Image (cartoon, grey):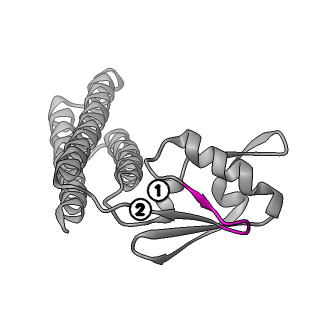
Amino acid sequence: MNDLIKKQLTDAQATMDKAIVHCESELTKIRAGKASAGMLDGIMVDYYGSATPLAQVSAINTPDARTLIIQPWEKNMLVPIERAIMEANIGINPQNDGSIIRLVVPPLTEERRRELVKKVKEEAERGRITIRNIRKDANEKIKKLKAESVSDDEIKTGEAEVQKITDAYIIKVDKHAEVKEKDIMTV
């Protein structure tokens, strides 16, 4: 196979790897009724005038499956952390006891579980669309190699390889979604 085509395949695969990582991180944010520090990713706290990730101003622990404990590095950060959690609207009310903030994750109702499964399916579909778009871009770049005297047979072989890689990555997305769905539906 032509080196130019190999480079396009490698680039496409690297981009698809990033898409999988992004899809995984988005699926992690969908909470399955279990406490996890990942639920708080993306929450920014006002730390002396600058927006700082919650994990950088406190220790986050999960003593059991339904509880998150947030221990700020500085006691005066309790109120800003509590405010940031409320503004993030994650569906959990923080309990401030003066030294730590406790988040108790409520058990999920059947209806809520179904809604979350729907969200998982939507996120998986976004992942699949992203992978297909990467395939489309890779195929276009491979077709443009014809101008650099790459034969039609090599272009067809390259496109077939891109399709194989795409199929493998779509299966990865589906597996991640399936695991998350099982996690949500397990009572």
Q: Nearer the viewer, residue 164 or 95?
A: 95
* Residue 136 locus on image (x, y percent): 26, 29
Task: Check disc 2 and report the residue beneath it.
Answer: 105
Q: Main secondary structure of the magenta part?
A: loop
**Residue 171 in view (yes/no):** yes
- Is 97 in the magenta? yes
* Residue 103 locus on image (x, y percent): 52, 62
Q: Which residue corresponds to the image point at 81% horizontal and 63% vertical from the top-left?
A: 74
Q: Nearer the viewer, residue 110 or 168?
A: 110
> What range of the chain is rendered magenta?
94-100
Q: Which residue corresponds to the image point at 56% horizontal and 56% vertical from the top-left?
A: 94
Residue type beneath disc 1: Met
* Circle number at residue 176: none
Asked if labels 1 and 2 touch by Cβ distance under 8 angstroms, the answer is yes
Displayed quadrant of residue 4: top left
Q: Residue furthest bottom?
A: 63
58 relative position to 49: left or right? left
Q: Is residue 147 above or below residue 30?
A: above
* Residue 181 locus on image (x, y percent): 20, 57
- Is 148 in the magenta? no
Q: Is residue 11 above or below residue 129?
A: below
Q: Secondary structure at mark 1?
A: helix
Q: Secondary structure at mark 2?
A: loop
